[in-house]
Image (tube, rainbow, N blue to C red):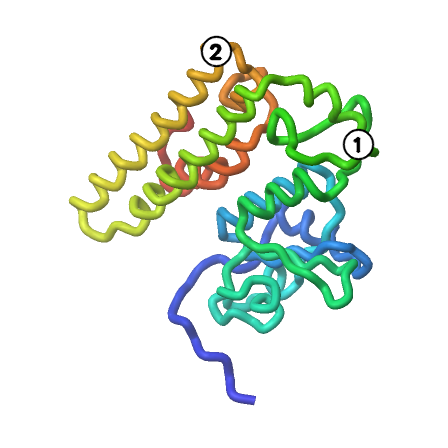
Amino acid sequence: MAPAADSGKHYHRICTGAALETVNAHQDPAAEITLFGSCFCPFVQRAWVAFEYLDIPYKNITHSFEVEVDPYQKPKELLEVSPKGLVPGLRLNKYDPPRAVNESTVIMEFLEESVEPKRTPTSAVCFLPNPIHVSPTATAISPLAKLPLDARALVRLQSDHVNRSLIPAFYRYIQAQDETAQIEGGKEFLDAIEGLVSLFQRAEKEGELSAVGLWRHDGELGWADVSAGPCAYFRTSDLGTSES
């Protein structure tokens, strides 16, 4: 067999620390959902956080998380769940043949709305103030159904801003090569962050505290937190900028 071609790209391809412990805790071959991903990808981290927060059983596909394989080689298993070879992707093993879901925001919605998480009356969790669909057995979510439509609309506006403005600005910023482009990219990224903050402030001003997530010190993890969090964390850690 000919050796796999070197893509020329160099990046961290193996989980370490608590992330590796999480991977190793999700190797049940009987799991109904298999998550394909790469540990360095913020879009994968969105799906990964959703799985963990919603306490949904899943299996991490080993070659993407534990074995040093270049994900840009687009292995056959990945292409079967994500035709463009992009991560994350889900394989739904309960079907014969298995079905697939891809794209990070679609996966977040799928997990939120269609997969029944382990919920109890004292630990109801969700991202949107009122999920579009919840299993009839997930009665712990029913009080959230009484929240106004405005809160859900505000969360979706935040999500739209993250995907349309913040994420593209983030990548332009970190990929810029010359100083001028880096400065302009940094300004654009900062503007996008300030735009998201203004949406949180709007939700707070309108009294929709369920739509502000962790932006408030007493808030709970929300949709915008999961959507923007991986990039925001990268900004404060890898780029060495202020958490404020």
Query: Pointer 1: what residue?
Result: 138
Under tag 1, what secondary structure? loop
| Image spot of residue 73 (x, y percent) | 49, 71
Q: Residue at x 60, y 29 (%)?
A: 128
Question: What residue is at 49 percent from the left and 36 percent from the top?
Answer: 229
Image spot of residue 60 (x, y percent): 67, 56
Identify the image quadrant of residue 62.
Answer: bottom right
Asked if the residue under mark 2 is in contact with the one under mark 1, i.e. CB atoms within 8 Å, the reply is no
Left or right: 142 with respect to 129?
A: right
Instruction: Decide: few, some or many residues near mark 2? Use Cα within 10 Å; few <14, some 14-19, many ≥20.
Output: few
Residue type at mark 2? Glu
Residue 8, placed above or below residue 198: below
Residue 237 in sight in this render: no
> Which residue is identified by label 2?
206
Which residue occupies the foreground of this view, 187 or 14?
187
Residue 23 in the image: state x and y as whole percent.
Answer: 68, 52
Please, what secondary structure does the residue beneath circle 2 have?
A: loop
